[in-house]
Image (cartoon, rainbow, N blue to C red):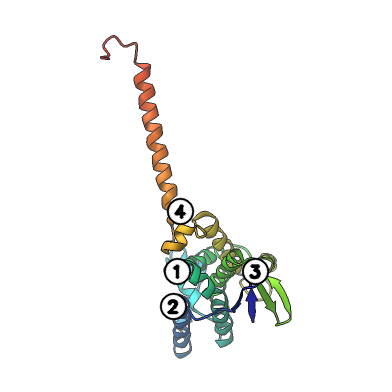
Amino acid sequence: MAYSYRREVSISFGGPLTPGVKSLIIANAVVHLFKVLIPAFASWFWLSPPLVLPPGFQLWRVLTYAFLHGDAMHLLFNMLALFMFGCSIERMWGTKLFVRYYLLCGLGAALLAFIPYGPFYSVPILGASGAIYGVLLAYGVLFPHNQIWILMTFPVEARYLVMVWGFLAFVGSLVGADGVAHIVHLGGLLTGLALIRWTGYLSSSARGRGEMMGSIRDMYRRWRMKRLRKKFEAYYEKRSGSGNDPNMVH
């Protein structure tokens, strides 16, 4: 596959393997090997909301599930998507920022599975698809006009493909009859959208320094300055209101 910018700039799909994507692929492969060698391994780490909530409190499952896969093909397709879309994002954001984004999308995707609706709440959930959907969302936002060739035949701009993925995930979440946890896919998309929209993933400063929460710190500083300004104004008004006090020294 190949994609291109509107400005006639062609880039091989995925490009050279980046450090963060490489580490995530290795981690997923190693976990899958443990799953194959140890029959009970998956049951210790897959996502099951009833096991995470009281009285179980097995909180690690909201993240570890994203490194488990049902079979080799499940692993292969997810890691191929991670390579194809993740490398371009990592080159733009930096390794630290990208890996944190990936993990947060996996975590956010898991949280939607706690909605007591359909079969998702009571069956084991495993797979990196939630995090991958967050990566797909980021790719569509960062490279909206890049052409993605479907079945090597139909070119579709990334932004439209993300819309289709989101629609299918939403419909699948409502139907939930094919054994796929579409609600987790939807959760990954929504988490990625929230991170990009509200935490400054697209700001040039965050990309340049490889910092995840650059804009949040800026927001906090502005909030602190606003709060201090209000305190000063309240103090000044109080002092001004006491101007008629005969004991006030001017």
Nearest to N terminus: mark 1 or mark 3? 3
- Image vertical order of residue 18 relative to residue 108, above or below: below
- In space, the residues marked 2 and 4 are separated at their CA atoms by 25 Å
Nearest to N terminus: mark 4 or mark 1? 1
Quarter of the figure with the C terminus: top left
In what element is the residue under mark 2? helix
Pointer 2 residue: 19
Seen from this angle, which residue lies furthest top?
246
User: Could you tell me if residue 125 is visible in this image?
Assistant: no
Nearest to N terminus: mark 2 or mark 3? 3
| Type of amino acid under label 2 | Pro
Pointer 1 residue: 94
User: Could you tell me if residue 244 is visible in this image?
Assistant: yes
In what element is the residue under mark 4? helix
The percent coordinates of residue 225 (x first, y second) are 39, 40
Pointer 3 residue: 7
In what element is the residue under mark 3? loop
Q: Residues within 10 Å of mark 2 (few under 14, many from 20)?
A: some
- In space, the residues marked 2 and 3 are separated at their CA atoms by 28 Å
Q: Which circle, 1 or 3, is nearer the viewer?
A: 3
- In space, the residues marked 1 and 2 are separated at their CA atoms by 9 Å
The residue positioned 41% from the left and 47% from the top of the image is 220
Nearest to N terminus: mark 2 or mark 4? 2
In what element is the residue under mark 1? loop
